[in-house]
């Protein structure tokens, strides 16, 4: 993956903590008084693989705050003011470590790597050598494999009221990927209500990299309401169609005249049940949009709730955006925050990225990182009240 940037601008007050995929979480004493009183997860304590898992709260001068855990770098809870000034938690998550550890946990709020999204049959060839990755999604690799970045305990390099800097060293061969990859991710909450996620990585050997964050948003609140009433705009004239295993075909199809046209904002539910092969493959939207080139101060996507009035702009330098409409959420377990069930299409993801399966598609933007190069990217989610 090439250089990128992930900035996220938000109005938030956050309450909750997570750890996923392997071990209890420990809240740091110095951050205890900054975590919202209604947090249901402040009692999660422990270690994972001998490393402490803690919670960190970022706050700005306007009262905006976000809670993050170094287990998987997860955004745990995020409260933003609605049109009436009422704080609304707009991300999905769990109250217990056990829930985050269960098989099939959907990567709530997690940092994703080494490779966000899918790689066909878990194979790619680099510098003449074929690599075999974990197969954890049918016949394919998804989000870095069984022990991707989402369930690693990240080291904390810096933690204060405005910034959390995390680092992780992914060893050569981890998940089948070549090269030892050193990754740094910085969350920064500014007084302009920006939560910036800045990614950096270097390697000692040629590898592939595609990092993102997997927050599940519901601007109605995380209470299980459908997101089909959300209005969505995506600045993309094309998308990458997929086969029945959700691997891109290598083509770039025009969105005009199809259910994938979000160049004018429309309700997510407007066309989601259309008689369309691509929608049937994804059980809804689960596709990469090829972003049009735009000025840095212009959003590549905007989503808003007609219920709460909350609007979220997405800014990125990435070439792609995965729009996922929560099609595989089932609501089978009432183990969401506060005992909430998260049913079908009760959240959406807007994951800034390079394209899925790029290592096997030479025509796609390259995700190769070589020794001596630096991977760098930033994305921005900006919360406001829709006008």
Image (cartoon, grey):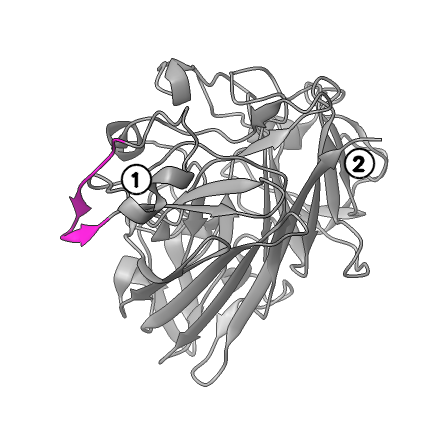
Instruction: Give the residue at mark 1.
Output: 19
The alpha-carbon separation of the residues under discs 2 and 1 comes to 37 Å
| Magenta: main secondary structure | loop
Query: Which residue is found at the position 28% from the left and 27% from the top?
Result: 96
Name above or below for residue 3 compared with residue 95: below
Whether residue 166 sits left or right of residue 231 in the image: it is left
Which callout, 2 or 1, points to the residue nearer the camera? 1
Picture quarter with the C terminus: top right
Residue 226: x and y, percent?
Answer: 60, 17
Q: Which residue is drawn at 82% across and 32% down?
A: 265
Q: Is mark 2 on a helix, strand or loop?
A: loop
Percent position of residue 363, x then y: 65, 65
How many labels, in total?
2
Q: Where is residue 120 in the image (x, y as percent from the top left)?
A: 45, 51
| Mark earlier in primary sequence (2, 1) | 1
Pick whichever, 107 or 175, lies toward us. 107
Q: Residue 56 carries which label?
A: none
The percent position of residue 386, horizontal first and vertical second, equals: 79, 31
> Foreground: 134 or 316?
316
In this view, 277 is above or below 114: above
Give the magenta-colored segment's residue range: 43-52
* Secondary structure of the residue carrying numbered label 1: loop
Q: List the single residue furthest toward the left.
A: 50
Q: Image height check: is 37 above or below 263?
A: above
State the residue position of label 2.
261
Which quadrant is the N terminus positioned in?
bottom right
Tell whether position 372 is magenta: no
């Amino acid at each position: 993956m090439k250089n990128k940037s992930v900035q996220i601008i938000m109005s938030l007050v956050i309450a909750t903590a997570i750890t996923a995929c392997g071990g209890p979480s420990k809240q740091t004493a110095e951050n205890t008084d900054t975590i919202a009183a209604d947090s249901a997860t402040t009692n999660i304590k422990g270690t994972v693989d001998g490393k402490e898992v803690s919670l960190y709260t970022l706050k700005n001068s306007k009262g905006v705050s976000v809670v993050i855990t170094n287990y998987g770098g997860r955004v745990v809870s995020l409260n933003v003011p609605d049109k009436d000034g009422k704080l609304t938690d707009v991300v999905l998550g769990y109250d217990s470590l056990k829930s985050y550890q269960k098989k099939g946990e959907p990567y709530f709020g997690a940092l994703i790597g080494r490779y966000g999204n899918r790689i066909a049959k878990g194979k790619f060839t680099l510098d003449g050598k074929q690599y075999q990755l974990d197969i954890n999604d049918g016949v394919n690799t998804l989000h870095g494999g069984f022990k991707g970045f989402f369930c690693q305990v990240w080291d904390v390099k810096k933690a204060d009221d405005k910034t959390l800097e995390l680092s992780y060293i992914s060893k050569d061969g981890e998940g089948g990927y070549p090269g030892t990859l050193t990754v740094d991710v910085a969350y920064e909450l500014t007084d302009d209500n920006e939560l910036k996620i800045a990614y950096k990585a270097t390697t000692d050997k040629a590898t592939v990299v595609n990092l993102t964050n997997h927050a599940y948003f519901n601007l109605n609140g995380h209470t299980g309401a459908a997101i089909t009433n959300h209005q969505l705009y995506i600045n993309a004239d094309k998308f990458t169609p997929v086969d029945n295993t959700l691997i891109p075909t290598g083509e770039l199809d025009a969105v005009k005249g199809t259910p994938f046209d979000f160049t004018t904002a429309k309700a997510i539910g407007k066309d989601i049940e259309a008689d369309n092969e691509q929608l049937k493959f994804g059980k809804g939207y689960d596709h990469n949009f090829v972003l049009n080139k735009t000025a840095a101060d212009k959003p590549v996507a905007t989503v808003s709730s007609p219920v709460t009035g909350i609007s979220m702009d997405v800014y990125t330098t990435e070439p792609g955006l995965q729009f996922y409409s929560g099609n595989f959420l089932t609501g089978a377990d009432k183990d969401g925050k506060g005992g909430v069930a998260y049913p079908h299409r009760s959240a959406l993801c807007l994951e800034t990225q390079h394209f899925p399966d790029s290592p096997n598609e030479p025509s796609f933007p390259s995700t190769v990182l070589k020794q001596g190069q630096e991977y760098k990217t930033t994305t921005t989610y900006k919360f406001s009240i829709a006008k």
